């Protein structure tokens, strides 16, 4: 078993064990893994305190909401605009761990803490928001300095040609993943989604979160103008969270399809066995 | 060479790590030692960073056109005590605000005294910790001018507001709140006696409530009876600086 260094000149071939992720990338990945679970689940608990979303600066119970999870006559519902669907059992009305029927938006298995507690959920959320944001800031600075961004994430001029993008989409649809040395590089769909998530989705998440702070709105009033008001920022924060969950789901599916043992090992130990070339 | 960790064990371990994080977090959050250290660090950091970034920054002020058509109430909407009923029946004619603690000259103010002082009117957004917001117009006395009047002692570090309302029926716990001196002297921090062009309604804290515009709703104490300057919050209530801070782990600094 030979261990080739991905950075060395000798081109590694299928079957070789190579080093794929740096320790900083791996550490950041697992910090994000824990922080995102905590942020997402505590966020759902915070949403439970007022399960309605509005557009504009203000919005409270007497005002029209564009999204609501609620209950009526023992049935749970989720309403988007004027479209209302029954969600009894999952959203609005559900049965808790102890068998008690609860009239709350998100169920106990999806929230942190499991039992209703806005104050504690805020502590989790507002502490790990710092962990998550500082992690992103350090990653951005480091990856710009050490070339990770330019070398591994920034698409090359060849890759952004429509023909290349189309062939990559076809490969993904056929579940044909890169083999041999090509498996060491992110493909164009990966690059686009990683750049989109890291440099757009997550910053929008962070800044809409900051817009909900009355103190930061006083310090940076432009936050309110960028997002169209505090309640709009709260709505965008929620939508962004859902998009982030979709990204994580696709990411997990890709890991499973590409070979979970090899992929997860490479994110823990950094070692990755290159898939054998066809033929 | 035998592998100590098989693939199956490895993948099971990874698959179980997400629920493990959650169960672990539930237990950690319930432990006071973790809650009051690690889980307070967000509040600690936000408070200091906000103060560094701009302790004098003003909250946005809106126009009449931006007012919420209906401004909902929250928390206690009527103290319901005999004393309060009496004051309400008399239109707060014999009600007195006591201002004391670490001050050179403790004083009392009638509602007429407060209304005769220079006032400030501001249309601001009220953000509840639950997530909703409402825009209202507030009219009242800047707290800083009252504090100048009674002259704070150098040891004073916090201003405490004691209220007429309580929570709980068997053993009622009175509502109280506290803020630091930066917020106390902030130009938009007022003792409001008017709302949307009228006298402050009972549901919103008559005769006076605090407006501390860069913090969340629970800091805006209603039905204020006493104001006290103190050096430390530890000997008041359960020592966390406010009713919700004492009973429910809510953060004392509610700027976020």
Image (cartoon, helix red, strand yellow):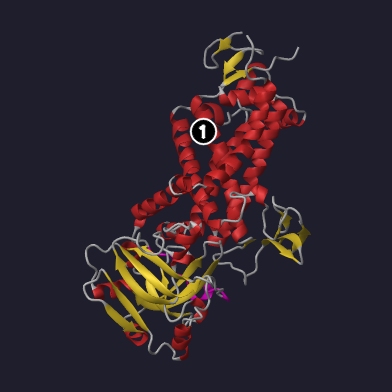
As helix, strand or loop, the secondary structure at mark 1 comes to helix
The crowd level at tag 1 (other Cα within 10 Å; few <14, some 14-19, many 20+) is some
Q: Quadrant of residue B159?
A: bottom left
Q: Is residue B184 visible?
A: yes
Q: Is residue A203 above or below residue B60?
A: above
Q: State whether the magenta stretch is mostly helix, strand or loop.
A: loop
Residue A161, can we see it?
A: no
Q: Quadrant of the N terminus of chain B?
A: top right
Chain part drawn in magenta: B58-70
Q: Nearer the viewer, residue A76 or B58?
A: A76
Q: Position of residue B129 (x, y in %)?
A: 52, 61
Question: Number of numbered discs present?
Answer: 1
Residue carrying label 1: A28
The residue drawn where x is 58% and y is 26% is A267
Q: Is residue B69 magenta?
A: yes
Q: Position of residue B229 (x, y in %)?
A: 30, 68
Q: Position of residue B200 (x, y in %)?
A: 46, 81
In the image, residue A166 above or below residue A269: below
In this rendering, would A249 be left or right of B73? right
Residue at image position (70%, 26%) is A258
| Corner quadrant of residue A245 | top right
Asked if A91 appears above or below A60 in the picture, the reply is above
Furthest residue in direction front, as rendered: B170
Residue A159 placed where, x, y %?
63, 29
Residue at figure coordinates x 74%, y 60% from the top left: A77
Q: Chain of mark 1?
A: A
Left or right of A140? Residue A71 is: right
- Please give left or right for residue A36 compared with residue A278 in the image: left
Vertical position of residue B254 compared to residue A164: above or below: below
Q: Is residue A273 magenta?
A: no
């Amino acid at each position: 078993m030979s261990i080739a260094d991905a950075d060395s000149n000798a081109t590694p071939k299928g079957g070789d064990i190579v080093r794929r992720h740096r320790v900083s990338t791996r550490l950041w990945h697992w910090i994000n893994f824990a922080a995102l679970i905590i942020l997402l689940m505590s966020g759902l608990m915070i949403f439970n305190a007022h399960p309605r979303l509005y557009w504009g600066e203000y919005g409270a119970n007497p005002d029209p909401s564009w999204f609501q999870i609620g209950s009526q006559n023992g049935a749970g519902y989720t309403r988007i605009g004027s479209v209302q669907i029954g969600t009894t059992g999952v959203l609005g009305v559900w049965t808790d761990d102890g068998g008690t029927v609860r009239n709350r938006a998100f169920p106990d298995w999806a929230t942190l803490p499991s039992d209703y507690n806005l104050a504690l959920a805020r502590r989790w959320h507002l502490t790990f928001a710092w962990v998550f944001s500082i992690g992103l800031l350090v990653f951005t600075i480091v990856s710009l300095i050490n070339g990770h961004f330019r070398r591994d994430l920034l698409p090359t001029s060849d890759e952004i040609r429509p023909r290349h993008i189309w062939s990559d989409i076809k490969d993904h649809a056929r579940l044909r993943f890169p083999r041999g040395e090509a498996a060491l590089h992110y493909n164009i769909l990966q690059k686009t989604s990683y750049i989109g998530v890291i440099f757009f989705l997550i910053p929008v998440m962070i800044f809409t979160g900051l817009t909900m702070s009355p103190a930061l709105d006083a310090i940076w009033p432009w936050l309110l103008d960028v997002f169209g008001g505090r309640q709009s920022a709260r709505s965008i924060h929620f939508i962004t969270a859902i998009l982030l969950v979709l990204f994580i789901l696709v990411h997990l599916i890709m890991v499973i399809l590409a070979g979970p043992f090899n992929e997860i090992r490479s994110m823990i130990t950094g070692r990755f066995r290159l898939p054998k070339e066809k033929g | 060479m035998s592998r100590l960790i098989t693939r199956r064990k490895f993948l099971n371990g990874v698959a179980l790590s997400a629920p493990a994080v959650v169960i672990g977090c539930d237990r950690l959050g319930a432990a006071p030692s973790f809650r009051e250290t690690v889980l307070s660090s967000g509040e600690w950091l936000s408070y200091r960073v906000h103060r560094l970034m701009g302790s004098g920054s003003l909250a946005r002020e809106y126009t009449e056109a931006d007012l919420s058509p209906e401004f909902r109430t929250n928390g206690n909407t009527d103290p319901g005590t005999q004393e309060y009923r009496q004051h309400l029946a008399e239109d707060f004619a014999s009600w007195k605000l006591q201002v004391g603690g670490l001050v050179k000259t403790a004083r009392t103010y009638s509602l007429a005294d407060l209304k005769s002082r220079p006032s400030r009117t501001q249309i601001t957004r009220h953000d509840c910790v639950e997530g909703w917001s409402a825009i209202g117009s507030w009219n009242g006395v800047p707290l800083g001018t009252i504090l100048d009047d009674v002259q704070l002692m150098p040891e004073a570090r916090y201003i405490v507001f004691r209220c007429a309302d309580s929570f709980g029926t068997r053993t009622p716990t009175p509502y109280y709140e506290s803020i630091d001196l930066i917020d106390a002297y902030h130009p938009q921090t007022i003792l409001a006696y008017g709302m949307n062009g009228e006298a402050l309604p009972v549901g919103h804290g008559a005769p006076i409530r605090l407006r501390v515009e860069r913090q969340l709703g629970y800091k805006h104490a209603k039905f204020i009876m006493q104001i006290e300057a103190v050096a430390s919050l530890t000997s008041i209530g359960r020592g966390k600086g406010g009713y919700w801070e004492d009973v429910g782990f809510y953060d004392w600094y509610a700027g976020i």
